[in-house]
Image: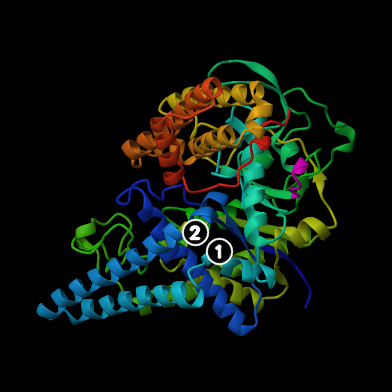
C-alpha cells in the first residue's frame, strides 16, 4: 500500500490543582468528572485496541499537576466515594421513573448505572486504583506516546523570570521520569504559548532585560519537539522580533504549510496544528460534537445531575430537549468518524500530489472534550483510527517518530504567540486579569531574591529547606494559566480569585516565616502549624528542588 502521509492525534489532558480545595460546583468534582468521563473511557478505548491487536499511536499529554493528583491516595479514596454517590443518585432516579411508569427513562438510568459501575470496576480491580500506571503500560508497549508539560500549566512566556520557566519545566520532567521511568522527548507548551529569546519588557512593571527563549530552555532540558497553532506559523518571520540573530533571506525558501515539521534555531522541532480538521471538531455550529443526536451536556436532572437528553437543536431551549438514544448516537459516531477519516485522507493525498512529500497532519485537542463535554468522543476517535486503517496510505504516528525520521524540515524564526483568541497573550493578560500578574510578579521576585541571598543555608538547613519548598509549591500552583483563563471566561471567578490569592498569600507568609527562622533558628508553634497545614493541603510536587530556581 502506498503511503500518503501521517496522522498525529494529540489529546492534551489537564486539570488544575483542586484536591483539598473545594468539591462542587468548583473544585474536586472537576477532577472526578474528568477521570470518570474522559480518562478511564480513553483507557477503555485503548483496551479495545489491545484486544484487536491494533496500536493506534495516539499522543496523550498528561500535565504533571494532573499526574500528581491521580497518583495520590487522597484522590483514590475520594474518587471511589464520588462513584458510589453517583450510583446512589441513579437508584433514586430509577425509583422515580418506576413510580411514573417511565420505562424509556428507566432504560437510560440502567445505561448510566452500568457506565458508573464499569468505571468503578476498572478503577479498583483492573487498574488497582492507578490510572497513570495503566497509561504507562500502553506507552511501554507502543500503543501511545505520552507528552509532559509545565508543572502546573504555567503560562511560560509571561512568567517573570527564566528561573520560574525552568522550574516549571524541570518539575514537569522530574514528575514524568518518576512515574513513567524514562525522560520525555515531547512537551505540550501550555496554551501552545511561546516567546523567543531577546530583550523582554515586563508588561506590568515595564522592567527590561535579556531573556532566553522558551524553546532554548526546553532544549537545554532535553526536550526535542512541541506543537504550535497554524496562525503562529503564518506569523513566523525571518527575524527574531526581539532583535536576535537573523537568518539569511536568500537561503530561506519554503512554503508555509502546516503539513511538515519545522525547526527553530535552538533545534526544537515544531509540529503545526491543522485548522481544517480542528474546525470539524471545535466549531460550535458545524463540529461533530454538536450533532443533534449526541448527549446534551448542559441539561441535567435536577435531583441527580444525570444527563438523560440529547442536543436536539443547537439553539433550542433546554426545556425542549428530547430524550437521548445511545443507539442513535452510535450511528452518528460511525458517520462522523468516516467523514473525518476521509477528510484527513483527502488533505494528505492533495499535499502529496503537490509536493511529493508524505505530509504530517496534526490534530490536537483538549482531552476533556472527549467523553466529558462530548460523551461520544472516545468512541468517535476509536472509529476514526479504525477507518484510517482501511483507507489507503494514512499512517497514525507519534511526534517522537516523526521528529526523528522525517526527511525534510525547514528552519523558521517564530514570533510570540499562543493558540488562544487572537493568537496572542490577551486571553491570559487583559484588564480583568492584570491584577493577578501584578501580584505574581511581585511574589516571584521576592521568592527568587530570598533564594539568591540565602542560597547556601536554603540548600543545607533542613528546616529552612522545608519552608522554602512549601513556598515553591504554592508559587508553582499560583503560576497556573487556569486562573487567568477562568477569569477571562467568567467561570467560577469567586473560586478562582480565592484560590489565586490563597496561594500567593501562602508564599508571602512562608517567606516571612523563613526570615524569622533565620533570625532565631527555631519555629514558633503558630508558624509550625501553618507550615504543616499548607503541606497537608498542597499534596503535590513533594520532590520539588530549590536548585531548579537557582540556575543563572
For the N terminus, the image quarter is bottom right
Mark 2 sits on what residue?
Answer: 70
From the viewer's perspective, is residue 156 above or below residue 340?
above
Q: Distance between the residues labelled 1 and 2?
A: 7 Å
Q: Quadrant of residue 353?
A: bottom right
Question: How many numbered marks does the figure carry?
Answer: 2
Q: Position of residue 56 (x, y in %)?
A: 64, 72
Q: Horizontal and vertical percent for residue 357?
A: 80, 60
Predominant SS along the magenta part? loop
Which quarter of the figure is the C terminus placed in?
top right
Horizontal side of residue 366 vs 100, given as left or right: right
Element marked by disc 1: helix
Which residue does the numbered mark 1 point to in the structure image? 132
- The foreground one among 501 and 448 is 448
Within 10 Å of the Cα at label 2, are there few (<14), some (14-19), or many (20+) other Cα atoms?
many
Q: Is residue 491 above or below residue 121?
A: above
Q: Is 221 inside the magenta-drawn segment? A: yes
Q: Are marks 1 and 2 in contact (CB under 8 Å)?
A: yes
Residue at 72% from the left image edge and 24% from the top image edge: 242
- Which span of residues is magenta-colored? 219-224
Across and down, in percent, residue 34 comes to 43, 59
Q: In this view, does 370 lie above or below 211?
A: below
- The answer, for residue 325, to whether it is visible in the render is yes
Amino acid at each position: 500500500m502506498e503511503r500518503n502521509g501521517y496522522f498525529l492525534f494529540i489529546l492534551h489532558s489537564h486539570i488544575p490543582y483542586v484536591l483539598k480545595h473545594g468539591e462542587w460546583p468548583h473544585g474536586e468534582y472537576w477532577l472526578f468528572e474528568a477521570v470518570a468521563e474522559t480518562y478511564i473511557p480513553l483507557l477503555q478505548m485503548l483496551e479495545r485496541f489491545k484486544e484487536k491487536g491494533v496500536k493506534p499511536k495516539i499522543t496523550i499529554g498528561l500535565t504533571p499537576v494532573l499526574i500528581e493528583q491521580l497518583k495520590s491516595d487522597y484522590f483514590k479514596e475520594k474518587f471511589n466515594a464520588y462513584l458510589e454517590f453517583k450510583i446512589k443518585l441513579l437508584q433514586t432516579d430509577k425509583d422515580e421513573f418506576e413510580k411514573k411508569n417511565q420505562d424509556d427513562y428507566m432504560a437510560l438510568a440502567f445505561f448510566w448505572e452500568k457506565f458508573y459501575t464499569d468505571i468503578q470496576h476498572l478503577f479498583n480491580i483492573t487498574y488497582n486504583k492507578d490510572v497513570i500506571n495503566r497509561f504507562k503500560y500502553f506507552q511501554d508497549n507502543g500503543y501511545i506516546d505520552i507528552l509532559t508539560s509545565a508543572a502546573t500549566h504555567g503560562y511560560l512566556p509571561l512568567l517573570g523570570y527564566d528561573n520560574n520557566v525552568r522550574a516549571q519545566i524541570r518539575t514537569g520532567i522530574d514528575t514524568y521520569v518518576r512515574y513513567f521511568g524514562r525522560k520525555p522527548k515531547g512537551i505540550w507548551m501550555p496554551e501552545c504559548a511561546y516567546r523567543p529569546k531577546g530583550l523582554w519588557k515586563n508588561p506590568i512593571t515595564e522592567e527590561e532585560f535579556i531573556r532566553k527563549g522558551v524553546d532554548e530552555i526546553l532544549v537545554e532540558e532535553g526536550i526535542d519537539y512541541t506543537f504550535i497553532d497554524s496562525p503562529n506559523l503564518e506569523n513566523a518571520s525571518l527575524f527574531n522580533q526581539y532583535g536576535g540573530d537573523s537568518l539569511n533571506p536568500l537561503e530561506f525558501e519554503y512554503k508555509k504549510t502546516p503539513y511538515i515539521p519545522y525547526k527553530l534555531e535552538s533545534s526544537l522541532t515544531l509540529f503545526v496544528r491543522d485548522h481544517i480538521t480542528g474546525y470539524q471538531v471545535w466549531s460550535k455550529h458545524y463540529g461533530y460534537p454538536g450533532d443533534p443526536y449526541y448527549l446534551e451536556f448542559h441539561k441535567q436532572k435536577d435531583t441527580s445531575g444525570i444527563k438523560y437528553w440529547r442536543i436536539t437543536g443547537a439553539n433550542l431551549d433546554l426545556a425542549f430537549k428530547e430524550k437521548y438514544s445511545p443507539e442513535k448516537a452510535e450511528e452518528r459516531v460511525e458517520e462522523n468518524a468516516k467523514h473525518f477519516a476521509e477528510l484527513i485522507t483527502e488533505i494528505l493525498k492533495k499535499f502529496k500530489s503537490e509536493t511529493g512529500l508524505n505530509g504530517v497532519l496534526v490534530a490536537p485537542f483538549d482531552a476533556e472534550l472527549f467523553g466529558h463535554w462530548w460523551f461520544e468522543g472516545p468512541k468517535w476517535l476509536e472509529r476514526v483510527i479504525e477507518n484510517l486503517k482501511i483507507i489507503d496510505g494514512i499512517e497514525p504516528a507519534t511526534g517522537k517518530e516523526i521528529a526523528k525520521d522525517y526527511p525534510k524540515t525547514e528552519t523558521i524564526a517564530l514570533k510570540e504567540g499562543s493558540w488562544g483568541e487572537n493568537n496572542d497573550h490577551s486571553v491570559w493578560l487583559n484588564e480583568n486579569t492584570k491584577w493577578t500578574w501584578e501580584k505574581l510578579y511581585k511574589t516571584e521576585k521576592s521568592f527568587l531574591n530570598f533564594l539568591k541571598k540565602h542560597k547556601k543555608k536554603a540548600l543545607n538547613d533542613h528546616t529552612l529547606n522545608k519552608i522554602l519548598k512549601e513556598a515553591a509549591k504554592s508559587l508553582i500552583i499560583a503560576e497556573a494559566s487556569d486562573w487567568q483563563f477562568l477569569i477571562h471566561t467568567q467561570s467560577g471567578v469567586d473560586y478562582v480569585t480565592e484560590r489565586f490569592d490563597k496561594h500567593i498569600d501562602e508564599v508571602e507568609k512562608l517567606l516571612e516565616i523563613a526570615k524569622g527562622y533565620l533570625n532565631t533558628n527555631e519555629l514558633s508553634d503558630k508558624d509550625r502549624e501553618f507550615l504543616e497545614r499548607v503541606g497537608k493541603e498542597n499534596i503535590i510536587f513533594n520532590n520539588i528542588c530549590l536548585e531548579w530556581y537557582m540556575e543563572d
